[in-house]
Amino acid sequence: MRDFARSESAAVQAQLDRLAQLSVPDGRLGLDTIRALLDRLGNPHRRLPPVFHVAGTNGKGSTCAFLRAMLEAQGYCVHMTTSPHLVRYNERIRVASELISDERLAQLLAEVLDAGEELNPSFFEVTIAAAFTEFAHVPADACVVEVGLGGRFDATNVLEPQVLAACGIAALGIDHERFLLAPEEGVPSEPLARIAFEKAGIAKSGVPLVTITESNPPEAERVIRSVANKVGAQLIEAISYGNGAIDADALDYPTPGIRGPHQERNAALANAMLRSQSRILVDEAAIEKGIAHASWPARMQLLQKGPLTDLAGERQVWLDGGHNRNAGDAVAKAFPGPLHLVLGMLDNKDPRALIEPLGNRLRSVTILPVPGHDAHPVEAFGENALSADRVEEALRNLPTDDCPVLIAGSLYLAGEVLRINEEMPD
């Protein structure tokens, strides 16, 4: 897959321009290329601190944020790689609890791109190789690694049992159908069961594999159970809030720092992953502090006062990158009252995914283009939808009332919103 990135650093931009030329040849699946690239770099993925590896359709990034917050609350130094970035490519690689610097990022990308010149790696494979190279070079206590797409064939799935502390699978849903539901013999045919099969591909022998029982339907859990049994992973089916521990003892956890009722499940998954392993210990006080203070931009984020939100007057402006039906259901639970929806969705997503769950609560729907990407036109969202060329125009033209505004539908749009409002992810 290709992605897009820009940097104010000329040195970083030169390497991002090289990255932008990369693509995956049609039909190429598997881990051969990323393994060959890592081999040329000295196999850094085998020299990492204990790794927490997280897959899922919805909530895997938030789970990573909770893991990082809990580990750092204990005083640990944490490496983390997540995707996509919102404003700056640097967001994908957090080294020893800090975003990678422009100077080091430029050097690192040049090293990895030079090593892989004849291999034709993808954008994401280069990114993961760069992250693992730096993580092996800089001392830290733990790594948090988010799966990019699927699990079985994701570039992060080169991680081997000896470096893994625990694996986790967040809530599942139908997304990336072209890649995750491609016809293949010997795999489940029912869509959600197939998604579960792909995500469970991160399971490793002897490594805890954690799920939250309430997150997925029985057919998905059965597939995960089957894959775990086949590879010899230690499957832990944990329960959610306020029983976020592996055992059934009710714990009085604080309200998660990342907003939305669905975040209780993600906090519980992070908690259960930490409790499932013994390589790096985190006490109850750190877990509670991490839950309360975790943050993750563009996930039910209340925007601060800034150049963009000033255009909406006194009303609240919320931002969420959700773009599938599960995300729509979560948003609907978070907003019980009326609201205005400003929406930009890639044309390979279901245009009804957010509108239908919100139903008659919507006071207006304004459709935006997604910067740099093909997006659904206004006609895809029904006869009452309005259109605007820019998010500033959408906020200026809202009806006169005090209903909150939700900007949603794409993390690429979310990144543009944060940039305009001068809220750079740190």
Image: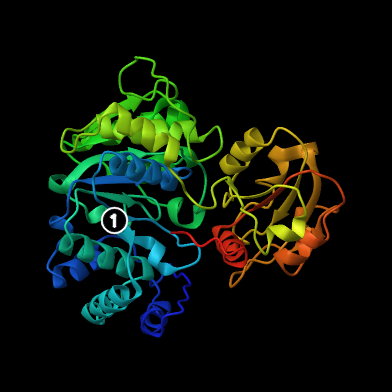
- Asked where in the image residue 280 lies, by quadrant, the reply is top left
Q: Residue at x 28, y 41 (%)?
A: 71
- At mark 1, the secondary structure is helix
Task: Kindly tell me whether residue 241 is visible in this rendering.
Answer: yes
Label 1 crowd bin: few (<14), some (14–19), many (20+), radius 10 Å: many
Amino acid type of the residue tagged 1 in the rendering = Thr
Residue at the far top in the pictured view: 249
Number of labelled discs? 1
Quadrant of the drawing holding the C terminus = bottom left
Using residue 393 as the reference point, say whether residue 350 is left or right of it. Answer: left
Q: Camera-side residue: 75 or 384?
A: 75
For the point 73% across and 50% down, the residue is 341
Q: Residue at x 76, y 56 (%)?
A: 312
Residue 144, position as x, y percentages in the image: 29, 49
State which quadrant residue 203 falls in.
top left
x and y, in percent, of residue 272 in the image: 32, 30
85 to 261, vertically: above or below: below
User: Residue at horizontal 75%, vertical 70%?
Assistant: 389
How is the model colour-coded? rainbow
Q: Nearer the viewer, residue 378 or 25?
A: 378
Q: Going by the image, does 264 lie left or right of 69?
A: right
Expressed as whole percent of the image width and height from the top left, the position of residue 27 reads 38, 66
Q: Is residue 377 above or below residue 13?
A: above
Left or right, 370 with respect to 138, comes to right
* Whether residue 361 is situated above or below residue 318 in the rendered picture: above
Residue 216 visible within the image: no
Q: Is residue 67 left or right of residue 376?
A: left
398 over 326 or under it: above or below: below
- Residue pointed to by mark 1: 156
Q: In x, y percent, where is residue 113?
A: 28, 78
Picture quarter with the N terminus: bottom left
